[in-house]
Image: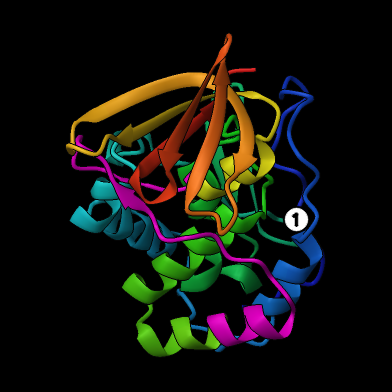
Amino acid sequence: MSRAAPEPDPTPDTASPRRPRDAQRRRVYLAETPLSVSPLADLAACAQFVDRVVGTLWWHERFPERDLGSVPRLRPGQGARQAFYREEHDGPTITLPRRYRTTCVVLHELSHWALGIDSGLPHHGRTFARVLLDAVGEFCGPERAGELAASYREHRVHVGKPPRLGPDSRLHYGWDERLRLGKGRQLEVSYRDPTGEPRTLCARFDGYERGSSALRFTQGDSQTRVRTSAVWTVRDVG
C-alpha cells in the first residue's frame, strides 16, 4: 500500500473549525507503506470492489447509511500524485491514480467515507485506524490485517477500541475517541443501565474514574456515573 505523500485534506472549506488536529496522519501513511498489495486492473475493477465491500452484511452492520445508492464516484486522477477522498458539492469522490488502484488503498478511502467528514474526529485518528484495520481483516484477510497491526505498532499509530453493538443492531465505532476528546464538553452518551435498559444522558463529561471503569458526568447540580463498558455511542453536542 504505497503512498508517495499525504493525501489532500478531505474536508471542504465549510467544515467545522472544531475538528481535532490530525496528529497521527503521517504515522498512518508510514504504517501502510510497506504492506503487500493486491492490485486492481483498472477503475472499473476498483468500482466493482467498492460495490462488493459496500454490499456486504459486514458493511451494513457498521455503516447502514452509507449504502450502494450513495457510493463515492471514482475518478482516474490524471496528474494527481496520490489517492484521496473528497466531499464535493455534487457528492463524494475518490481519486485513484493508476499506481494506487489496490484493494488496501480503496479500503483506506472508503474508511474516510464511512466515518464522514462531519464526524468530529481526526481524519486519521484512532477510530479511522480501527475501521481500516477491521476492513482489511474482512476484505483482505487476517494475514494482511496482521501486517497492518504490526506496522501500526512499529510506527506508534494509536488504534481505537472495537465497535460496540447498540440496540439498533448496529456496530458503533468512535465511542472511545469521542470520550477521549470530550472532557469538559457536553456529550450525549447512549448506554445500558444496570438492568440492561438503553438510556441516553446529555451532560458535561468530567472524565474517567480511577481505573477507567466508570465515567463521571455533571448535569446541573447533580453528578452521574456511567459504566464505561455499558456505553455504545457518544456524540459531542457542544
Of residues 50 and 203, which is closer to you in this image? 203
| Residue at image point 17% right, 37% down | 195
Q: Is residue 167 magenta?
A: yes
Q: In which quarter of the image is residue 32?
A: bottom right
Q: Quadrant of the N terminus?
A: bottom right
Of residues 14 and 188, which is closer to you in this image? 188
Q: In which quarter of the image is residue 52?
A: bottom left
What is the x, y in percent for residue 29?
72, 70
Q: Does the magenta stretch include residue 165?
A: yes
What is the x, y in percent for residue 12?
72, 29
| Residue at image point 54% right, 60% down | 160
In the image, taking residue 14 as reference, residue 225 lies left or right, namely left
* Residue 109, placed above or below residue 91: below
Q: In which quarter of the image is the C terminus?
A: top right
| Residue at image point 52% right, 40% down | 215
Total marks placed: 1
In the image, taking residue 64 as reference, residue 122 lies left or right, namely right
Residue marked by disc 1: 7
> Where does the magenta region start and end?
149-175
The answer to whether one can see residue 235 in this image is: yes
- Mark 1 Cα within 10 Å, few/some/many (few <14, many 20+)? some
